[in-house]
Image (tube, helix red, strand yellow):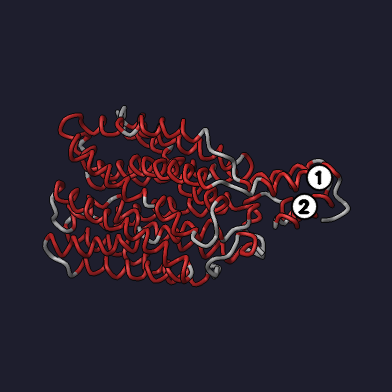
Amino acid sequence: MSTYLSTKDTASISTANESEAVSKGQLIYASIVAFFAWTFSVYDFILFGTLLPVMAADFHWTTGESAKVATWVSIGTFLVSLLVGPITDYFGRKNALLITTAGAAISSGLTGFTMNPLYLILVRAISGLGYSEQAVNTTYLSEISGHSKRGLLYSFIQGGWPIGVLFASFMTAVLLPHIGWRGVFWVGTLPAVIILLLRIKLKESPKYQQLQEVRHLMKSGKTKEAHRLGQELGIDSEKMTKSTVAQLFAPDIRRHTIFLGIAFTLNWFAIQIFAVLSTTVLTGGKGISFNNSLFLLILSNALSYVGYVFHGYLGDKFGRRGTIIVAWICGGLSYTYMLFIAHGYWPVLISYSIGLFFLIGSYSALFTYMGESFPTRIRGTGSSLINSFGTIGGILGSVLFTVLVASGTPAHVVQASFFAGALPLLISGILMFGARSVPPSQSLEEISK
């Protein structure tokens, strides 16, 4: 250790190194809370798309008008989600987790009071906080978990997506006839509030505490000490003088940020079409009844949970980027088959489920990859910014779908679903070749160098 450091600074390093130790109990507690937090954030997020046809019928909206509302909701979600990255890197992982969980609860509760499109758009914009839950989760959990099975651990947490979708579909099927679509939204508020209280007990990430030690020295004018401490902790203090967003586009990480951002944006075309607007595609394009489409979503999302664990394991063993590339290409081919070749309930069910297995299931590898492929100093901003690009994909996917669906006939819906969903999914897999290749089972410090 350098002699440039004072006794106080040496103590800071000692404290930071001691904070590395996260007990098994703390990791399990954080993982369980993260799972349920993400599950109910997804419940709120997906419920909007699932109930959109019902809400449209209540307010007498056409399919085109519904798609426009979904587009404006995506715009609001994007703007709100941009705030989460800087919060995560400047104010702490724990604080960001509390804010995103609160956002999901508020969004779900207020949606039940919708009286017009403008109110709905403004309220659903708050769901951008809940949507960003996954980016903060991967930042936090990647910093407190071991490197050898990081992806497998996170796969169980990210698996909250299909569980949240299943819960939303189940509650819709069971409660919609009795309490209406407003009541179904209100159901998700109380669990989110409980999770918010549970998250107060979380321990701050040791990596963030180390980052704060370096920042403290820099703000105190102790540049040399900050540099030495940064070297000890694997944090490049010299690059921290710029904003975290500017650092994402510095020469050392720029190509990775751009390719990953574009690939994720295009991938969210497919998420918007085949997950958020899935009932519209299945009912309007493939002739599946609304009740049958809900049952189809339940079965396919149950299979996609297996996909999370499968892709999480493959990512740990063979590398996450390659796992993501193969999965997205296979998903695009499966959806293409569903749209143009599959006819009848079971062929549609099987091909849709396989597509969701690869599209949704690969996100356990994807978000672990996002969390580990950015340095600690910009990990929160990097993960959250890339995650926010998903809402841009949702916006563009909705716009393209709205334009292509035209008269709303089944043929138009099928073609629109291909060009706005399946094709972008295929292209997103190819673009991932331009992102960083991260060998499996490496520590965060090794990856960042």
Q: Quadrant of residue 356?
A: bottom left
Q: Residue at x 58, y 65 (%)?
A: 442
The residue closer to the viewer here, 153 or 399, is 153
Of the 4 image quadrants, the one containing the N terminus is bottom right
Quadrant location of the C terminus in the rendered image: bottom right
Q: Amino acid at mark 1?
A: Asp
CB atoms of marks 2 and 1 within 8 Å = yes
- Which residue carries the number 1 mark? 9
Amino acid under disc 2: Leu
Q: Position of residue 298 (x, y in %)?
A: 22, 50
Kindly tell me whether residue 330 is visible in this rendering.
yes
Rendered residue at 37%/58% (across/down) = 308
Residue 432 appears left or right of 11: left
Q: Residues within 10 Å of mark 1 (few under 14, many from 20)?
A: some
**Residue ID for mark 2:** 229
Q: Is residue 165 left or right of residue 82?
A: left
Decide: is 430 above or below 412: below
- The answer to whether 223 appears left or right of 76 in the picture is right
Q: Residues within 10 Å of mark 2 (few under 14, many from 20)?
A: many
Q: Which residue is rendered at x = 41% and y = 56% of the image?
A: 155
Q: Is residue 76 visible?
A: no
